[in-house]
Image (spheres, rainbow, N blue to C red):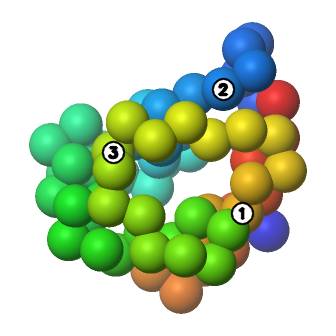
Amino acid sequence: MSDSATNSDTIDLQDWMKLEGLVETGGEAKFVIQDGQVLLNGEVETRRRRKVRRGDVVEFRERTFRVEF
């Protein structure tokens, strides 16, 4: 698992993915999220502006990440 740090209580899923380096652009984040390629806490998430919080688990491209602030 990889940890990430930010300075707020929540962050948009697409922004978190860019921050973690999972995608290079917002457009790429939009595509992979809306295409159903991202799981949030074990569920397919298609909302790119979905807020993620500390402790959430994101799965993408056969890797698992825990959101940490």
* Image position of 32 with respect to 21: above or below: below
Mark linked to residue 65: none
Residue ranking furthest to the top:
7
The numbered mark, 2 or 3, whose residue comes first in the sequence reads: 2
- Whether residue 8 sits left or right of residue 69 in the image: it is left
Residue that label 1 marks: 57
Horizontal relation, residue 12 to residue 59: left or right? left
Where does label 3 land, which residue?
48
> Residue 34's quadrant in the figure?
bottom left
Spatial CA span between label 1 and label 3: 15 Å
In this view of the protein, can residue 10 be seen by the observer?
yes
Q: Amino acid at mark 3?
A: Arg
Q: Give the number of the disc on residue 10.
A: 2
Amino acid identity at mark 1:
Val
Residue 44 lies, in percent from the top left, at 44, 74
Number of numbered markers: 3
Secondary structure beneath label 3: loop
**Residue 19 seen in render:** no
SS at circle 2: strand
Give me the residue at 24% from left, 37% from top. Answer: 26
Instruction: Identify the residue at image location x=55%, y=36%.
Output: 51
Q: Quadrant of residue 2?
A: bottom right
**Residue 9 horizontal side relative to residue 48, left or right:** right
